Image: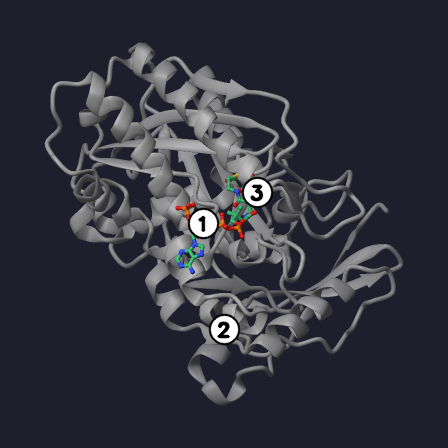
Amino acid sequence: MTTRIPVGIEAISTHIPRHFIDLKTLAKANGTDPDKYYHGLGGRRMAVIQPGEDPLTLAVEAARKLFDRYSVKRKDIGLVIVGTETAIDAAKPIAAYVHGILGLPGECRTFDTKHACYGCTAALKTAADWCRSGSARGRKALVIATDIARYDNDSPGEPTQGAGAVAMIVGQSPALLALEDYPEAVFTEDAMDFWRPHYRTTAVVDGHASIDNYLKALESTYRRFKHESGLAFEDYDYLLFHVPFPKMAFKAFRLLYEREMKSENGNRFENMETDYRARSWPALWANIEIGNVYAGSLYISLASLLEKQSLRPQSRRLGFFSYGSGCCAEFFSGRVGPDASAWEGKIGLQEALDNRIELDHASYRRFRAESERLLKNGSFQEDLRLDDMGEATILFCGIRDHQRVYSIIPDSSRRRRHDDAANKNKEERELFTVRVYS
Ligand code: HMG
């Protein structure tokens, strides 16, 4: 391994929608055996956005927490990259909106990366290279994954939906996770396993082919990484995979276990299930509750692992497999940093899950239809409010004159809401318009 400047993740935060639907409710409504979703796919619940939430609001909420709660300073940011496959515009990146709304420095590069679920890994790796190259000059990168996973109603993909965002600060003091600097292990093949034409709000997918492609890309990148790094299957304390649905992580782990057990002399766990429970399962508890977050799923897993104090002693090695349909994949590794234990309870994933509101099937479908209605020019609704504001700081109010209109809740008003529960839903709001090109 070449040892250049240490680079990695200094801080991480997440944001998930306030609402969810239980997969049993979905199964009952579409006449499926709930065991297929609970056991066959491994999910339990999935996050559902309500009208007023969109990929930009999810990204802003996740990133704002980095500045509000942790010692991250806006003036230090020199690069903003958003990995997403839920673009809100064909030309202008979500990164530019985030930059404006959060008041980041003008001397900053901003862009989005897209390659299905691989988008955030492309962003993370680009940010790490920016730091290593010296271009960062001591500044830090803000890397965000934000996505809304949506398939057609009543399709096989429907129980694998979800939504959320993860924001990370990447820099040269990787207190949370140092990315190990091995030669890259990537794989690309032009495939039609999953895509979303511009005229659709839902993805088109060849589900079974996509599973085969995922596993083929895993095999290829793992083999390459093993060759480049000299690391054995045994050398990872945890193995994290892209999680389109939780059972997929199991399939991925099983593939590596079966291949590697043949080629390596023994394994500290004699049984594949036991090994999986010890080394992959601890990173899946939030994915099981949220569903697919496309570009964010792998990083929701990372946040889940980091949030549990007992699971993150310093220097533990994590292996990551990132897969984006289409397809592009990468295997890489990182080591838990010295300050990771100071993050206990700070990521807030468990707390956010504990405070969610359950939807019945009719409300889930209504939320979806109303959210989609807001995507049309002329949909702007000045009085739009979330059903339950929670900690929301920004709302998407629809489109007026081809401009997306957001309503920002000022800090003073947010503090009042916090102090006085009766003020819930009565915040003063400032309208913030951004232009969309359509
Ligand atoms: P399906 O065809 O409805 O399900 O769709 P199935 O018949 O294959 O069953 C699924 C599993 O449930 C099977 O288990 C069944 O045996 C089991 P497995 O054989 O796989 O171990 N099952 C039951 N278990 C208990 N009780 C029952 C029962 N019935 C069946 N009664 C599929 C499944 C995943 C294809 C579908 O949900 C889908 O198309 N999802 C979206 C695509 C996807 O998630 N692909 C994953 C790999 S590609 C990827 O990860 C990229 C992606 O995130 C996008 C991006 O890159 O941006 C999607």
Label 2 CB, ligand 1: below 8 Å?
Answer: no
Give the numbered dot on residue 435. none
Q: Which residue is mark 2?
A: 25
Give the CA separation, mark 1 to mark 2: 17 Å
Disc on the earlier residue, 1 or 3: 3
Give the CA separation, mark 1 to mark 3: 12 Å
Whether residue 167 is situated above or below residue 400 in the rendered picture:
above
Is 23 placed left or right of 283 in the picture? right
Is 166 placed left or right of 10 in the picture? right
Residue at figure coordinates x 61%, y 77% from the top left: 363
Q: Secondary structure at mark 1?
A: loop
Disc on the earlier residue, 1 or 2: 2
Q: Which residue is more in the foreground, 104 or 437?
A: 437
Residue at figure coordinates x 55%, y 56% from the top left: 161
Q: Which residue is more in the foreground, 436 or 136?
A: 436
Whether residue 293 is situated above or below residue 408 in the rendered picture:
above
Q: Which residue is mark 1?
A: 245
Query: Within 10 Å of the Cα at label 1, are there few (<14), some (14-19), or many (20+) other Cα atoms?
Result: many
Say what amino acid the circle numbered 1 marks: Phe
Label 1 CB, ligand 1: below 8 Å?
Answer: yes
Q: Which residue is mark 3?
A: 207
Q: Secondary structure at mark 2?
A: helix
Whether residue 87 is situated above or below residue 355 in the rendered picture:
above
Q: Which residue is more in the foreground, 110 or 277?
A: 277
Residue at figure coordinates x 39%, y 49% from the top left: 246
Label 3 CB, ligand 1: below 8 Å?
Answer: yes
Q: Secondary structure at mark 3?
A: helix
Residue at figure coordinates x 59%, y 79% from the top left: 387
Asked if one can make out residue 102 in the rendered structure from this viewpoint, the answer is no
Asked if one can make out residue 336 in the rendered structure from this viewpoint, the answer is yes
